[in-house]
Image (spheres, rainbow, N blue to C red):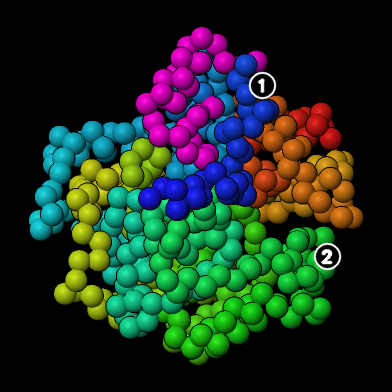
Amino acid sequence: MTEDRPDPTRRFDPHQSEGESNLSARRRRWAEANLDETARAAVEADARHFLHQSVSTPCLTGIARAEGIWIEDVQGRRYMDFHGNNVHNIGYGHPRLIAAIKDQLDALPFAPRRFTNQPAIDLAQKLAAIAPGDLSKVLLTPGGSEAIEVALKLARAATGRFKTVSFWDSFHGAGFGAASVGGEQLFRSGAIGPLLAGGEHVASFTCYRCAYGYPERDGKPDLELCHMACAGYLRYVLEKEGDVAAVIAEPLRVVPYLPPPGYWRAVRAACDEFGALLIFDEIPTGLGRTGTMFACEHENVVPDILVLGKALGGGALPIAALIARPGLDVAGAYAIGHYTHEKNPVTARAALTTIAIIEDEGLVERAATLGERALARLQDMKARHPLIGDVRGRGLVLGVELVQDRATKAPANDAAEAVFYRALERGLSFKVTMGNVLTLTPPLVISEGDLMRGLDILEACIGEVG
Ligand SMILES: Cc1ncc(COP(=O)(O)O)c(C=O)c1O
């Protein structure tokens, strides 16, 4: 049987769009130079016991502590965490969160399915209160990928259609449904397919290197020239297919890529025209990160379904949610998200407490203010370093795109990896996205001093590599 079936994993080398490669020569050299015996033992044990996969095992090193903006490895080295998988909006180990979780464990640690509980009800009510527009019907899931899958099922149930339109290069989770709407080889190609039928993809707004071939002006779209071809093409696909159930996308791509002004209003109108739902994946951008509670508020566009996760668990527990408009409560006869931990009172209490901390500590406004200052600092950096082709951001989602040459914009992937490992050596962790974008998403509780210190480290590393 196997003779007839070529091994797809051997024939296919997927594009490393997410994070740095865990198999690169530079990773090996970094480990040799930096890991002590304890750290090496942790990494080796991890590699022995876990299935290997991209962006995970083999791991960088072992983590022993996480507190505030810091992670500390097993050999006692501390890193400011400007990545944190975007779970750490309130910082790690927030005392109020830890106290609430402990209290909830004592009061009610679990509620079997078929039963409800007060923290879950309170959370659903709170999510409806903070969600934009009339979004108010909630479903909780253990993780973001599952919430995306529920949103897809709900869109099918509501429209009687199954096709989707989403972005190339996007990530929506590791499940089959989520990977089908995602647009990264790592999660969908080679050994992994076939995926769900009907998953159309379009190129998204990436104005610095527009996939539709239009030039930009200092990273911004020249709308008089391009007439937002990216939104126009999405509308075209909706029209040609005629029976798309949903457009699903991050309103602000966390790479980051910022939508041109008016992009989402145009897409919302096209969805309405052709009967498709609009699903916003705000799993990394929700809960204050972009300087508004949800990134779609910058666009003045309300989706039909909003999905959030990650930071909802306060950087401690896994929980995600979707919030739909009431008219979409149409699948009551089916089990669309019947997860064992659907209404876990402990994760629900963690989410409620996290939202309370974000509100009480003014973290949304804080992200807006600090984000502006950080972006100004990055622009300043760009003026000094030709290695930087573009800087962009909104709130505390910031990106530095490295290029070999500003004229050709050839991506400087090797330099990006070199900057990443140098930064780790100096106590700063972040993520490399799309091979050449340094993605910075620090906790919203960070002090301005620490934020600028992190950017100083980044600049020093860029200077050395450049
Ligand atoms: C935009 C986006 N959607 C979905 C997910 C999946 O969330 P989870 O890892 O909780 O399944 C992620 C996680 O990185 C994400 O960034």
Kindly tell me whether residue 239 is visible in this rendering: yes
Using a 10 Å C-alpha cutoff, classify the residue at mark 2 as few (fewer than 14 neighbours), some (14 to 19) or many (20 or more): few
Q: Residue at x 26, y 38 (%)?
A: 100
Question: Mark 2 falls on what kind of element?
Answer: strand
Q: Quadrant of residue 232?
A: bottom right
The extreme right residue here reads: 407
Residue range highlighted in magenta: 33-60
Foreground of the two, 25 or 250: 25
**Amino acid type, label 1:** Arg
Total number of numbered labels?
Answer: 2
Reply above or below: 405 against 229. above
Residue at position x 44%, y 48% in the image:
3
Res 217 label: 2
Between marks 2 and 1 in the image, the one whose residue lies nearer the viewer: 1
Q: Identity of the amino acid at label 2?
A: Arg
In the picture, measured across the screen, residue 462 lies left or right of residue 81, that is: right
Residue depicted at x 34% and y 56%: 146
Asked if the residue at label 2 sits under 8 Å from ligand 1, the reply is no
Name the spot of residue 81 as percent of width and height, x first. Answer: 55, 34
Question: Which label is found at residue 415?
Answer: none
N-terminal of the pair, mark 2 or mark 1, is: 1
Q: Relative to residue 157, is residue 72 depicted above or below? A: above
Q: Is residue 291 magenta?
A: no
Residue 178, horizontal then vertical, whole percent: 42, 60
Q: Quadrant of the C terminus?
A: top right
Q: Nearer the viewer, residue 85 or 57?
A: 57
Q: Residue 29: which disc?
A: 1
